[in-house]
Image (cartoon, coloured by chain):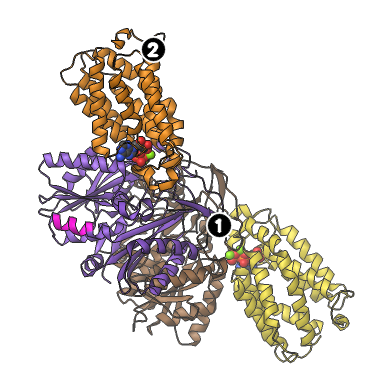
Chain colours: A brown, B yellow, C purple, D orange
């Protein structure tokens, strides 16, 4: 594993040091171990706070989406493991403007337990908490059990939508309603061309030889649902788009946003080759792409591969999607 | 058993868990993300460290709280949160106790299992730790006084793990692989089995350890 | 080579299709082969145009820096090879607002010849052209021959500075003056942890085993100047920062901007670990970091590795650095 | 030699250049970015394709322009731009010529070399193609009528390449490796040498090709 690190034990803390040093005007730590980081301008009185969190190794996910018009705080776990309830509670207090906090994170066992624990403790301190969990990975559970699905790159849209709603002053239940509505309209599927290696474990969770690919993988090096020969960019894009549309069931004439996400090692050029075919497939089904996002939005250290997310829009969601947003890792203004 | 003996047993058994790191890593890699080995090894080292400063006066509750907190934050994966939370529930049910007889131990174990069920919302047959834990506690409940009860618990746990291997995991990360989890033993249940086996070694006569003869009553 | 592509021959054209499809409001093609792409809102009467260009495989470089407050047009070559003079001329005409065009690109043999040829042809068509060539790689030639140095990631600062000057309406010679001034104050040095593979060649240009690194590499898989055992993040950062400061000679109390650039496969987390140490080293020398940029700014397909660039500021350059800029690949607003 | 024969010779020699792709790739990878093999193979195939539609009426100038444009855009690296530009300069100096004697060929070759010097701003000893090209053209100049002139040019080019291998490249991408270029033969100069060797094969009696016996005069 060719890594530019000092040692695995101090890795996450050094990453956080670097981020806080690089962006002092945008982010600040609200815990002694720097594992709870919030917007520099938060808490803001009577403004709903949004706390997310999860394991490290996925930048820009999760910390990268703390900013204006996005999430307002984050709790940072070790590589691929959950933040503790204390860290989540610290982030909660760091963003609470007296009108409640929304927990918004991906569906992972450890995270669910720790966020639930933190929610209990926050209530004891008079902070109302609602929770919306991202479950966009179509490959991870059948439609009838969609609530059990894994949360992957599509959570970017939830941050964008919920963040814009909070930024314009919506109340807690309204922000939660809109975030849940967005979650119901996002579907993601991924493909891996190389496994990822947990630094501490030192061994990949699955092996992929040259010329092989794994379809339906998650962000933590878990195996997918199908392993086979590596296919062309168009063939892979066909697989992902068809599985997503079969589940999302967008009617012809609908408007969507599309995210083609790189898992870390795949070059931006290859993601645009995938977008090219995705745009064609959607056009064939008379589905209009309102906005396209192409790049590394949710990675898995040096994993080679990509995922595609489709987010079905209506007028309410489109307005929130088009709103300005700014963090040191993601900016969107105007057109 | 007094709290001092209890603390020593937990310490001795915990010391033996890191030996299972590789096995648990491979089992978890087959249908999850391969970190259970780290959770168990880092978690049990943290438990030993947490027991270190405790004096003889430390109550069962204090001991279990220390273990629960230590285990849950060492490598906070799902298993760490589940077991950590379970130990905190057991600590609550141990309040006021100064001696642990078998019935008390069963009460604590039921509190631990109950928290895991409440938090994890899993059922028997979902291929989780519960498929080994719950049946083995029933065995304990039904032969409370048998000197061989631990051996029986180990047998039932082993048998449950082998039986459920052919099932599809319905909970946690393993469930996302859908059919891919079929044919693989559940890593969490195996970690529990290894713990029981090491417990048997530690409290068996002949092993180098404090006099635990009164455990049998 | 695990790539998500259809075939090497159509790769660049498919990438360009994908980019134009994804960002129709920001970019437009001005040549039948899509190899000349300009800002959607250009040409703008009496506004200086800035044309850049180079081989594909480096996104966001070069095309990613076409936008508001950045370059205004680009000529796109095949992977790691130069655009032709025809393509450069097409981009030139596509951005000329009647007050001249600045050619701004990295110092590579093929590019220099083709841009010179295009400049001759543009003059014949009444378009005045000035040229500023990026030469920021300290490892590629001794200080006395700095004009022969290779252009690498530091060219990002030239786009930001020259683009801001053109956006505020500066004349051609003024934009060229400022771009050249910026070039004199940027220094870059890189490290590679894996070679890159030219798709057509199919074989890496140099081999690196596990536990080895190559210091002073460029963006086209060229060998560096030193190959040795892989060192810690801090040790590598020491090497890069010291070599840069020895050449740039910033006095204590000076202000700089810092870019920690990923070459493609290196995770964002590791870049921030490098920034952490870079910030410390600069602080030790009483050098203030005015702005930090961390991420993939100039890649080399799936190459693992990074480069650090330091840009010494004065009041004029700082104001231009802080100006707004926006392309589909890079946005900066306000603080 | 008339333009028809000139076109056939260039075509036959160009057809032989892709065979050198691997060698040139490896030489360029050692001190550059490894694309010279592609430039020469793609470039010479493009030259053959550009010659295809030309009829017997095509003048020397038209032939050289076609070759220059084709070679420079097939894989537009530094070498492609240099040789392409040089061929355009040779085309200019061939204007009005209907026959090519040796003196004319030398004039064209000097024009090509001159453009490479003007554009590349390299000198002898910078370890570029010039270190083989310029000395071999001087040999051509000094023994214009010798039937062995091509053999002598090949020898001097070969010797120059071997001699300059120990130098540090001072031009282009190879110069950025600084000392790392020492001990490696210049890829561009080698490409020129292979071209001369194939030219010798093509115009030597006995090889299957049109009657070129008048070339010697
Ligand atoms: N909802 C649940 N209820 C009970 N046990 C669970 C549950 N989810 C996971 N487990 C247990 O946890 C083990 C996996 O633990 P771990 O590797 O820490 O999870 P992860 O890496 O996905 O966070 C499984 O083998 C299973 O025994
Ligand atoms: N300035 C120059 N003058 C003359 N020849 C040059 C010059 N620069 C490069 N060359 C020749 O070009 C060859 C490299 O060509 P090529 O691989 O196409 O370059 P690159 O890949 O760097 O664009 C060198 O071996 C050398 O012979
Ligand atoms: Mg796991
Ligand atoms: Mg895990
Ligand atoms: Mg080359
Ligand atoms: Mg090249």
Residue D204 is tagged as 2
Image region (quadrant) for ligand 1: bottom right
**Percent coordinates x, y for residue B210 in the rendering:** 84, 81
In the depicted structure, whether residue C232 falls above or below residue D164: below
Taking the spot 70% from the left edge, 57% from the top edge, the residue there is B165
Distance from mark 1 CB to nearest ligand 4 atom below 8 Å: no
User: Does the rendering let one see residue D190?
Assistant: no
Q: In terms of image quadrants, where is residue D1?
A: top left
Tell me the SS state at disc 2: loop
User: Does the rendering let one see residue C43?
Assistant: yes
Please give the count of numbered marks on the rendered protein.
2
- Whether residue C39 sits left or right of residue A265 in the image: it is left
**Percent coordinates x, y for residue C239 in the rendering:** 45, 61
Chain identity of mark 2:
D
State yes or no: residue B127 in magenta.
Answer: no
Q: Along the line of sight, which residue is nearer the eye, D28 or B142?
A: D28
Q: Along the line of sight, which residue is nearer the eye, A25 or A330?
A: A25
Q: In terms of image quadrants, where is residue B66?
A: bottom right
Which secondary structure class fits the magenta region best?
A: helix
In the depicted structure, whether residue C181 falls above or below residue A69: above
**Percent coordinates x, y for residue A252 in the rendering:** 34, 49
Q: In terms of image quadrants, where is residue A112?
A: bottom right
Taking the spot 79% from the left edge, 70% from the top edge, the residue there is B198
In the depicted structure, whether residue A40 falls above or below residue D126: below
Q: Along the line of sight, which residue is nearer the eye, C30 or B213?
A: C30
Q: Which residues are magenta?
A: C173-180
Tell me the SS state at disc 1: loop
In the depicted structure, whether residue D114 falls above or below residue C103: above
Quadrant location, the C terminus of chain B? bottom right
- Whether residue B154 sits left or right of residue B115 in the image: it is right
Taking the spot 32% from the left edge, 27% from the top edge, the residue there is D46
Disc 1 designates what residue? A221
């Amino acid at each position: 594993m060719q890594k530019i690190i000092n040692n695995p034990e101090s890795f996450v803390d050094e990453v956080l040091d670097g981020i806080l040093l690089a962006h002092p005007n945008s982010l600040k730590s609200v815990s002694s171990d720097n594992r709870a980081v919030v917007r520099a301008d938060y808490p803001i009185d009577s403004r709903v706070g949004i706390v997310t969190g999860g394991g490290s190794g996925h930048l820009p996910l999760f910390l990268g989406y703390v900013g204006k018009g996005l999430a307002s705080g984050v709790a940072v776990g070790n590589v691929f493991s959950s933040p503790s309830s204390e860290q989540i509670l610290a982030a909660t207090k760091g963003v609470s403007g007296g009108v409640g906090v929304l927990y918004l994170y991906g569906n992972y066992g450890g995270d669910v337990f720790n966020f639930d624990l933190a929610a209990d403790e926050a209530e004891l301190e008079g902070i109302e908490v609602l929770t919306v969990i991202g479950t966009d990975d179509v490959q991870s559970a059948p439609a009838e059990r969609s609530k059990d699905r894994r949360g992957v790159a599509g959570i970017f849209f939830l941050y964008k939508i919920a963040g814009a709603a909070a930024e314009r002053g919506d109340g807690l239940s309204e922000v939660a309603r809109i975030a849940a509505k967005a979650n119901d309209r996002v579907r993601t599927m991924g493909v891996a061309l190389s496994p990822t290696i947990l630094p501490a474990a030192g061994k990949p969770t699955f092996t992929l030889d040259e010329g092989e690919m794994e379809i339906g993988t998650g962000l933590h090096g878990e195996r997918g649902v199908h392993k086979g020969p590596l296919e062309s960019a168009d063939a892979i894009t066909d697989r992902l788009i068809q599985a997503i549309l079969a589940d999302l069931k967008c009617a012809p004439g609908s408007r969507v946003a599309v995210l083609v996400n790189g898992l870390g090692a795949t070059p931006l050029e290859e993601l645009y080759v995938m977008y090219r075919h995705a745009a064609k497939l959607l056009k064939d089904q008379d589905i209009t792409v309102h906005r396209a996002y192409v790049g590394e939005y949710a990675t898995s250290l040096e994993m080679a591969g990509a995922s595609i997310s489709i987010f079905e829009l209506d007028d309410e969601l489109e307005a929130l999607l088009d709103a300005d947003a700014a963090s040191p890792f993601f900016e969107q203004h105007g057109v | 058993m007094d709290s001092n003996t209890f603390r020593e047993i937990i310490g001795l058994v915990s010391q033996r868990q890191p030996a299972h790191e590789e096995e648990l890593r491979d089992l978890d890699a087959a249908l999850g993300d391969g970190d259970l080995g780290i959770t168990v090894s880092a978690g049990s080292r943290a438990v030993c460290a947490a027991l270190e400063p405790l004096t003889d006066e430390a109550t069962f509750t204090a001991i279990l709280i220390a273990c629960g907190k230590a285990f849950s934050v060492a490598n906070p994966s799902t298993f760490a949160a589940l077991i950590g939370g379970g130990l905190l529930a057991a600590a609550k049910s141990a309040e006021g106790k100064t001696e642990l007889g078998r019935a008390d131990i069963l009460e604590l174990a039921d509190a631990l299992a109950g928290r895991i069920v409440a938090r994890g919302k899993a059922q028997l047959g979902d291929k989780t730790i519960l498929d080994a834990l719950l049946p083995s506690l029933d065995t304990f409940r039904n032969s409370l006084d048998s000197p061989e009860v631990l051996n029986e618990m180990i047998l039932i746990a082993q048998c449950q793990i082998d039986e459920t291997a052919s099932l599809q995991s319905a909970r946690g990360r393993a469930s996302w692989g859908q059919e891919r989890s079929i044919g693989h033993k559940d890593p969490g249940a195996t970690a529990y089995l290894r713990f029981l086996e090491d417990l048997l070694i530690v409290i068996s006569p002949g092993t180098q350890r404090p006099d635990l003869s009164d455990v049998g009553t």
